[in-house]
Amino acid sequence: METNTQETATLGAGCFWCVEAVFDDLKGVTDVVSGYSGGHTENPTYREVCSETTGHAEVTQIKFDPQEISFADILRVFFAVHDPTTLNRQGNDIGSSYRSAIFYHSDEQKQTAEEIIKEVTEAGIYDDPIVTEVTKFDKFYPAEDYHQEYFANNPTQPYCAAVVAPKVAKFRKQFVRRLKK
């Protein structure tokens, strides 16, 4: 009898192009989709989310095999690849759509998120307090097709070259043993 061991993580860490590019390389991750979550507008568009009127955050929905990588390790990568101490901002991207957020899919994910936030806080990695929102998952809306695999398909686009590529390079160096071959 075959069992489905896939789990889902829905994370907001600023621009979803950066987050998708990082998690696409992570061993144990089977799929990453850029999209929107945490707001009140049904089926939002990128333009609507950027207008800051929908309440949604840019997120990535990550499918992973918990026998290969734990949700806790997914979160350790998440906290290493963005600044969880800036409210509604990542670098030059400003607004609630760029907020740091964990949309948990179960009570176990919520507990793990709280434990990892405590772990990262106690490690003293950041000078400022972590402001990552931990909210029960409600709905996920995939972003438009042109946003999917954006960095992989547009590595020389100016934002990708200046912002995404350095984040991916830092991630690959820091987590070399966790990369897909």
Image (cartoon, rainbow, N blue to C red):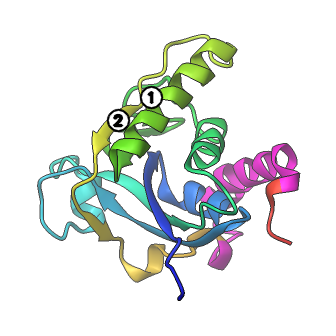
Name which residue lies at 31% across and 60% down: 36
Identify which residue, 3 or 137, lies in the foreground: 3
Q: Position of residue 23 (x, y in %)?
A: 63, 60
Q: Secondary structure at mark 2?
A: strand
Identify which residue, 143 or 180, lies in the foreground: 180
Q: Quadrant of residue 17?
A: bottom right
Identify which residue, 117 or 34, lies in the foreground: 117
Q: Main secondary structure of the magenta part?
A: helix
Q: Is residue 14 above or below residue 48?
A: above
Q: Is residue 54 above or below residue 151?
A: above
Name which residue lies at 46% across and 25% down: 86
Instruction: State the quadrant of the C terminus.
Output: bottom right
Q: Secondary structure at mark 1?
A: helix
Q: CA distance from mark 2 to mark 1?
A: 8 Å
**Numbered marks: total:** 2
Do we see residue 120 in this rendering? yes
> Is-magenta flag for residue 36?
no
Q: Earlier in the sequence, mark 2 or mark 1?
A: 1
Q: Residue under circle 1?
A: 114
Name which residue lies at 61% across and 23% down: 120
Near mark 2 (Cα within 10 A), the count class, few <14, some 14-19 or many ≥20, is some
Residue 134's tag is 2
Residue 85's tag is none
Asked if labels 1 and 2 touch by Cβ distance under 8 angstroms, the answer is: yes
* 127 sits to left or right of 148: right
In the rendered structure, which segment of residues is drawn in magenta?
152-177
Amino acid type, residue under disc 2 in the picture: Val
